[in-house]
Image (cartoon, rainbow, N blue to C red):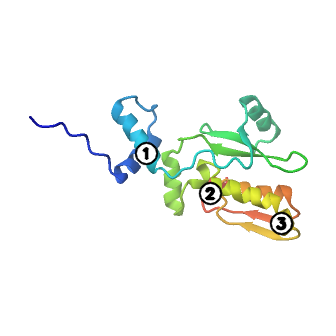
Amino acid sequence: MKAARAAPSPSRGSLRWAILRQALKVSPPSSNSTDRSIERCTKEISRKASGGFKLIPCYVLSEDVEEKLQLLDRKFQAGPNEIFVCFQLPVEGDSKLILIQRLEDHIGLGDFKISNSHDVDTTGLVCCWPSEDVLAYYCINHCEIFRSKRVLELGSGCGLAGLAIATCTDASEVIISDGNPEVIN
């Protein structure tokens, strides 16, 4: 009688393909055991951090607040896969930054086309990364180093650090840039 063998673990490459496949699926993830197993494994290899360090408190704005923002300024148009996120900067005066971010797991094929045509990635569209949270917090707490300086943030991602410098310091000029035109738009 032969002993039953456990199914081999999926390779790291196949797990990365599973992440991409899940991101491109239009339908919600299925509940079969194979998909749940792959989902568990992809969480082990995915490099996307969840939640960050929470140095700068943030929350998703409710839909009624979003509508008011859109009425005030037509530039504040969030797409169907985007949300408004409010960052409460830890400074006197209760300064807030409102940024538009992608919904979790809503990267589309169009994003990959833009990335390929401009030879850039989509990391700035996905979320505010923990390193950006830390940099923004550091800049806010060391605002004197920016006094009367011109600041250039290269590869800004969602732009939290550069916008925090522009909001909370006496920098003479702040320029925020990124290679992905979707981030800048």
Instruction: List the single residue furthest toward the bottom.
Output: 149
Q: Is label 1 in a helix, a strand or a loop?
A: helix
- State how far apart marks 1 and 2 are (Cα): 29 Å
**Identity of the residue drawn at 37% across and 52% down:** 12
Q: Position of residue 44 (x, y in %)?
A: 45, 47
- Whether residue 79 sits left or right of residue 115 in the image: it is right
Neighbor class of circle 3 (other Cα within 10 Å; few <14, some 14-19, many 20+) is some
User: Hey, what amino acid is under mark 3?
Assistant: Glu
Left or right: 96 with respect to 10?
Answer: right
Amino acid on which the number 1 mark rests in the picture = Thr
Residue name at image x 27 percent, y 45 percent = 8
Which residue is label 3 attached to?
Answer: 173
Quarter residue 79 falls in: top right
The residue carrying mark 1 is 42
Cβ–Cβ under 8 Å for marks 1 and 3: no
Return the residue at label 2.
181
130 w.r.t. 155: above or below: above
Q: Which one is earlier in the sequence, the residue at label 2 or at label 3?
A: 3
